[in-house]
Image: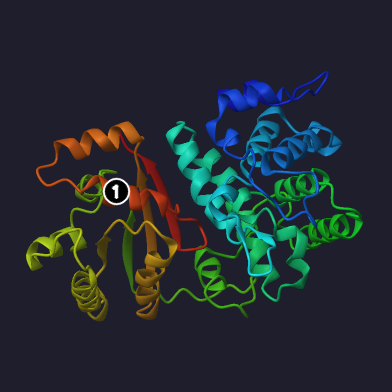
């Protein structure tokens, strides 16, 4: 993106003009004065740490050796890696400053910031994934599910990017001896290289093998799982106004549709009311298609990974092939489309969905299709 490209340190001097960065981004200015745990962040508030992390990144030879586009993308990730700390910082009962959950919240917030700024989808999702996973190299070797974590990160972004981000994060602190953490980051890089997922997506024998690897923790990633699917379930995902109904008419006109909007109308349930009756009715209709072995479309916003996982799990239980179609549109286009609807979704409800928006990723389905409409 142009604004990050203009602000990113560049040869020959690799200087960071922090005043220009602050002027460009209100969310950077919001980091000023946000406390941090002095044991791990003696350098001061979150803005100070973010500046120091960006300066550390600019000094890394491995970052300087990257192509310009990759340098800019990593610079954006370092700028955004702690963007959610103002939302998550608390003092616990012992008076210690904590920021639990800031990586996940940072993923959501970074996605929104970059979406509103018009960033390309792939670029945006790469950066958001780095923000979400930026702490992984610090402690990953202690995790029993390390393989799944590393493989997922490789499919959403790149683990060598994650290593550079984590290195800049640690070097941008004043917290005593950092050698142990830097060693852990190095070991994580070695592990990813051994697992063929350091600078590329982890390969699988088939999309069916990949799908089941992320559903069963003990699965051998190189096992060529027999594809015994008997139907296809197309799971739609997108904010209201993204164009889901239009896409279904254009691309799946022959299939039956389980539509939550249609069920709300049929049951007389308002969008702001309790949605459990709608969910129950949708699940029962989906089961009818699954039992009969009929391919169908599941049409709902399915904004969060948790919501999608329920539909995907049900489909997988009936040996269905799962295709997720993720649609989105620029904010202006969504507002215009909502304004033309006879019964628009209330703005407050749309805002709640935007705050929870997790873009689907390749670990969730056999096939992922992403499209920008409008």
Q: Position of residue 50 (x, y in %)?
A: 70, 40
Q: Position of residue 42 (x, y in %)?
A: 80, 49
- Residue assigned mark 1: 350
- Residue 323 visible in the shown view: yes
Q: Observer-nearest residue: 51 or 165? A: 51
Q: Is residue 302 above or below residue 45?
A: below
Q: Residue at image x 41%, y 55%?
A: 356
Q: Residue at image x 49%, y 37%?
A: 114
Query: In the orientation shown, which residue stands out farthest toward the top?
Result: 12
Q: Position of residue 101 (x, y in %)?
A: 58, 60
Q: Quick check: 56 left or right of 340?
A: right
Q: Is residue 8 above or below residue 50?
A: above
Q: Is residue 194 above or below residue 45?
A: below
Q: Observer-nearest residue: 222 or 32? A: 32
Q: Quick check: 307 left or right of 338?
A: right
Q: Quadrant of the C terminus?
A: top left
Q: Residue at image x 38%, y 64%?
A: 308
Q: Tell me, what colour scheme is on the image? A: rainbow
Q: Quick check: 153 left or right of 180?
A: left
Q: Position of residue 300 (x, y in %)?
A: 27, 59
Q: Label 1, secondary structure: give it.
A: helix
Q: Quadrant of residue 230?
A: bottom left
Q: Quick check: 138 left or right of 20?
A: right
Q: How many marks?
A: 1
- The crowd level at tag 1 (other Cα within 10 Å; few <14, some 14-19, many 20+) is some
Q: Quadrant of the N terminus?
A: top right
Q: Quadrant of residue 55?
A: top right
Q: Residue at image x 67%, y 22%?
A: 19
Q: Is residue 142 above or below residue 180?
A: below
- Residue 259 visible in the shown view: no
Q: Observer-nearest residue: 89 or 67? A: 89
């Amino acid at each position: 993106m142009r604004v990050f490209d203009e602000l990113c340190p560049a040869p020959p001097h690799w200087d960071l003009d922090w005043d220009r960065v602050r002027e460009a981004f209100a969310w950077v200015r919001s980091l000023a004065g946000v406390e941090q745990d002095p044991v791990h962040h003696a350098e001061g508030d979150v803005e100070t740490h973010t500046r120091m992390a960006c300066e550390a990144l600019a000094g890394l030879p491995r970052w300087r050796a990257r192509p310009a586009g990759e340098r800019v993308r990593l610079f954006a990730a370092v700028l955004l890696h702690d963007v959610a700390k103002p939302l998550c910082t608390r003092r616990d009962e012992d008076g210690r400053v904590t920021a639990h959950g800031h990586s996940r919240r940072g993923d959501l917030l970074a996605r929104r910031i970059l979406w509103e700024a018009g960033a390309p989808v792939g670029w945006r999702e790469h950066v958001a994934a780095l923000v979400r996973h930026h702490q992984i190299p610090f402690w990953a070797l202690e995790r029993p599910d390390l393989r799944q974590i590393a493989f997922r990160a490789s499919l959403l972004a790149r683990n060598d990017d994650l290593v550079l981000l984590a290195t800049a994060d640690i070097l941008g602190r004043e917290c005593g001896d950092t050698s142990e953490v830097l060693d852990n980051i190095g070991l994580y890089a070695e592990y990813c290289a051994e697992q063929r997922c350091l600078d590329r997506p982890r390969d699988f024998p088939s999309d069916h093998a990949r799908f089941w690897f992320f559903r069963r923790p003990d699965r051998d990633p190189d096992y060529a799982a027999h594809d015994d699917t008997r139907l296809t379930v197309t799971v739609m995902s997108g904010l209201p106004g993204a164009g889901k109904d239009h896409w279904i008419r254009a691309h799946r006109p022959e299939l039956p549709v389980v539509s939550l909007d249609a069920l709300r109308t049929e049951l007389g349930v308002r969008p702001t009311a309790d949605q459990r009756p709608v969910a129950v009715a949708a699940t029962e209709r989906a089961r009818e298609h699954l039992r009969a072995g009929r391919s169908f479309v599941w049409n709902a916003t399915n904004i969060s990974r948790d919501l999608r996982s329920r539909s995907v799990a049900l489909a997988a239980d009936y040996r269905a092939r799962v295709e997720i179609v993720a649609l989105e549109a620029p904010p202006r286009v969504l507002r215009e489309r909502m304004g033309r609807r006879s019964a628009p979704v209330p703005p407050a409800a749309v805002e709640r969905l935007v705050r929870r928006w997790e873009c689907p990723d390749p670990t969730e389905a056999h096939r992922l299709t992403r499209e920008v409409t409008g």
